[in-house]
């Protein structure tokens, strides 16, 4: 009669181990799906803990900054030279951590001879922050070209010795 309780204990322990293994496998699969999804983004996406250590770095980050996931994960935001001069973003990170309210900002970023503009979205997460950056360089360049063209035509009109007006196809001013 004492063998029966030991069999129950054995079955119970095996059942617990099986459930734990299944839960671990489900978690691993879920993490792999998340990584696959986040790495499929063409936009830059990373995550940090509350101390600004990188916990995720997608393929777009690797391509843009030329630093692999392995080189970045676990390191601090402050460990990298490409962050120099961007102290204002740390203030936003801290604000999002404190308030738990997402923030968005347009930011420019120089890398070598190139200059980029990003729409930066900072979100609070359970472990720290998630940052999503969309490259808006082409849009900003188009806006600047439009402003330059408008300024050019304004100068022509302002400097013309002749009366100038603009009308539509029907002649309406």
Image (tube, rainbow, N blue to C red):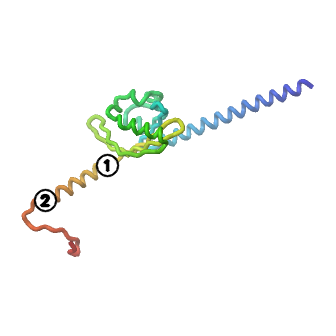
Q: Position of residue 11 (x, y in %)?
A: 80, 30
For label 2, the residue is 156
Q: Is residue 169 above or below residue 122?
A: below
Identified at 28% across, 52% down, the residue is 143
Q: Position of residue 116 (x, y in %)?
A: 31, 42
Furthest-bottom residue in this view: 170
Q: Nearer the viewer, mark 1 or mark 2?
A: 2
Quarter of the image where the N terminus is located: top right
Q: Which mark is residue 127?
A: none
Secondary structure at badge 1 equals helix
Q: Position of residue 119 (x, y in %)?
A: 38, 46
Q: Position of residue 129 (x, y in %)?
A: 48, 38
Q: Nearer the viewer, residue 52 or 101?
A: 101
Residue 169 in which image quadrant = bottom left
Q: Is residue 46 visible?
A: yes
Q: Nearer the viewer, residue 84 or 137?
A: 84
Q: Is residue 123 above or below residue 24?
A: below
Secondary structure at badge 2 equals helix
Does residue 72 appear to the left or right of 29 in the view shown?
A: left
Q: 10 Å neighbourhood of mark 1: few (<14), some, or many (≥20)?
A: few
Furthest-left residue in this view: 161
Identified at 22% across, 71% down, the residue is 168
Q: Is residue 42 visible?
A: no
Q: CA distance from mark 1 to mark 2?
A: 27 Å
Furthest-right residue in this view: 1
First reached walking from the N terminus: tag 1 or tag 2 = 1
Q: Are marks 1 and 2 in contact (CB under 8 Å)?
A: no
Q: Is residue 42 above or below residue 87?
A: below
Residue 25 in which image quadrant = top right
Quarter of the image where the C terminus is located: bottom left
Q: Which mark is residue 138?
A: 1
Identified at 66% across, 35% down, the residue is 23
């Amino acid at each position: 009669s004492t063998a029966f309780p030991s069999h129950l204990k054995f079955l119970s322990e095996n059942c617990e181990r099986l459930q734990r293994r299944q839960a671990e496998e489900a978690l691993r699969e879920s993490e792999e799906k998340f990584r696959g999804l986040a790495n499929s983004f063409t936009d830059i996406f990373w995550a940090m803990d509350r101390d600004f250590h990188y916990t995720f770095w997608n393929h777009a980050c690797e391509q843009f900054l030329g630093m692999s996931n392995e080189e970045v994960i676990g390191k601090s935001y402050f460990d990298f030279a490409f962050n120099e001069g961007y102290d204002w973003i740390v203030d936003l990170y801290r604000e999002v951590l404190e308030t738990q309210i997402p923030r968005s900002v347009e930011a420019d970023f120089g890398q070598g001879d190139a200059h980029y503009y990003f729409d930066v979205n900072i979100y609070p997460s359970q472990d720290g922050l998630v940052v999503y950056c969309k490259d808006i360089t082409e849009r900003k360049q188009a806006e600047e070209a439009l402003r330059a063209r408008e300024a050019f035509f304004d100068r022509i009109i302002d400097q013309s010795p002749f009366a100038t007006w603009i009308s539509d196809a029907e002649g309406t001013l």
